[in-house]
Amino acid sequence: MSDSLLAATGLLSPSVAGQALALDSMELEQQRQMTIKAANVTLHYETDGKSYVINMIDTPGHIDFTGRVTRSLRAIDGACVVCDAVEGVMTQTETVTRQALEERVRPVLYINKIDRLVKELRLNPEQMQNWLAKIISNFNQLINVYAEPEYREKWKVSIQDSSVAFGSAKDRWGFNFDIAQKRGVKFADIYESYTSGNISELAEKCPLHDAVLSMVVKHHPPPHVAQAYRIPKIWPGDINSDLGKSLVNCDDNGPIVMMITNVIVDPQAGVIATGRLFSGTVRSGDRVHLIGAKREERIQSVNIFMGSHREIVNDIPAGNIPALLGLEHARAGETLGIEKGISSFESIKYVSEPVVTIAVESKHPRDLPKLVEGLRRLVIEDPTLVVKINEESGETLLSGMGVLHLEIASSLLQDMDLEIVTSPPLINYRETIRKPAGPFMAKSPNRHNKLFLRVEPLTEEIVTMIRTGQLNENMDKKALATILRDKGWTPDEARKVISIEERGNMLVDATKGVQFLQESMDSILSGFNDILGSGPLAYEFVRGVKVVLDHYVPHEDPAHRTYAQLMPASRRGILAALLSADPVLLEPMQGIEVKCPSDQIGAVAGVISSKRGKMLNVVQKEILTIIDGEIPASETFDLSEMMRGATAGKAIWNLHFKAWTPVPTSMLSQIVTETRKRKGLSPEPPNPSEFIDRE
């Protein structure tokens, strides 16, 4: 599809459009016939005697690379959602449409592979129209559910206003309602073209690029219109300030403000930061501030990306997507400004969490520095990858969204001339508690300070609000207290939240009239953060826990209440409380959507149940059956072999992260023991009595 658009604007020879896959420039993308990285290109399109410049980002469709879609959505104002004519609205369609609407990005719909309706489903023109009407209705249902009230009706798509296009990217034809009226095309003509095999005429009469680009020009807003309603949503600063007005008006002459959405490490050029310029004009040689990194850096050159190639332009105005060289400390999600201390854009929230891990090591010890540098590059380019070094075993652990995500990451490391050895994939667990416990007293190593700590489980609703950024440390304390009181917290605890940890944990100060607390809090907080990164059961991240400091008895002399005394005491107190609060491991549960002929339902059900999964819903759609279910991530490694074997290859399925659920009690001790052994720990978790101090 993107090849057709490039060919239409003169960037690609029409003879190779469709085979060149110009925006999938990586060798891996070409081999696997799938998009892995987001690619930017600027198109020049003319219609009705007017010229338009369209900044386009081609994003991946696979669930493991959703992070790239999430980041790209911040840089754009409109999304063209591509949907398969046979598969219809799939899980990933729903995920990215929801994210687009949360960012106030206006969607239009392009239904691809219309040829499958004729060749595979054997539908006549009337049946085709009914089938497609259902897909449009399902898509509008998503807008109904996820759009904000003021955009709900305005942004729904319909055939009549040409916000829906139909086509076949492989055969390079497409049309929307306006084009169908102008050129006299009906579904009967499509049917006729495929039954008679005369498709090239159709591509000449209705080229795909006209259908898609005319729909974009008609429905997607220009930057100065979009920023007026998007900035209040994505930027927390004062809209009525001079800077706020410049952002809302997309002012070329205003101060430079840009959000970096993608970073590439080029072996020759160094770090290339790409993002949306919301205000001002960037020029080569400008000095700018990276707000999060608190650094001033100089822009060496201003470029724009044309697929995999970079074109140097010396300056570029607001509303565009520049690629800047010279910003060594730039990272995705960073705000860049000409002034110090401006408000940063809202941080980008990812839908999924890394749930699969592999251990990576270099085959030859001499390559270790190269491996460290390679991993650093990967994490800069893809922040959804997490690298962690296990201090107990010395392993370098790489965590990602799924097995494919890690497979691609490993291939990229090998492309850097690195010989690496990887372990089989391992599942990431989380730890939480099922009941309150405490308060427990913990004494500092010198026995002069006493901390009294207790823990409680947080509700899933509050954990979700922390994960999505609705509750965070930087928000107004009164607003935070109001939300927590509404969720059933006592007024005292709601007012005194000390820390909100991004994985879904909180530290609350419930002490009254304690001396020296303020200066000791950083040390207590360090103990809290340390335990949350390595829980007591299996050294996995802790999730969904409220830690409450009930009382603190400090020593009067500052020399006796240092970090070295209070951090271990805080750790011990929280450990004792967690181990006494019925701790449990949480495993990642994957949602599974299977499409198969109706005679294969029994086989699919057998595979899902043999994997500790369950079926939640079965829907019949013409000749296809759609099964929705859930299956633990730890059971999915050999799913493809089993599913293909059971259904003779007739089932198509996809997996997506759904939720964290408790590990079954019967399996808990075995998983804890195996995980602890793998991490070089003693097989049995500690006993709470080891950490409880007596008076």
Image: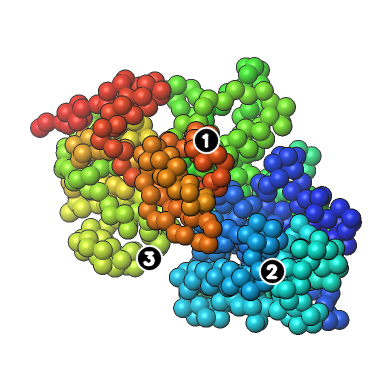
Q: Residue type at mark 1?
A: Gly
Residue 380, percent from left and from top = 62, 43
Q: Residue type at mark 3?
A: Asp
Residue 609, percent from left and from top = 37, 41
Q: Residue type at mark 2?
A: Phe
Residue 508, percent from left and from top = 27, 52
Residue beneath label 3, please?
476
At numbered mark 1, what does the secondary structure look like: helix, strand or loop? helix
Mark 3 → mark 2, Cα distance in angstroms:
48 Å
Mark 1 → mark 2, Cα distance in angstroms:
35 Å
Q: Give whichever of 57, 344 is nearer the camera.
A: 57
- Is the residue 166 above or below the residue 675 in the image? below
- Is the residue 567 above or below the residue 435 in the image? above
Q: Is residue 101 left or right of residue 49?
A: left
Name the mark on residue 530: none
Closer to viewer: mark 3 or mark 2 = 2
* Residue at image point 48% right, 74% down: 144
Label 1 CA crowd tier, 10 Å (few <14, some 14–19, many 20+): few
Name the mark on residue 645: 1
Residue beneath label 2, please?
166
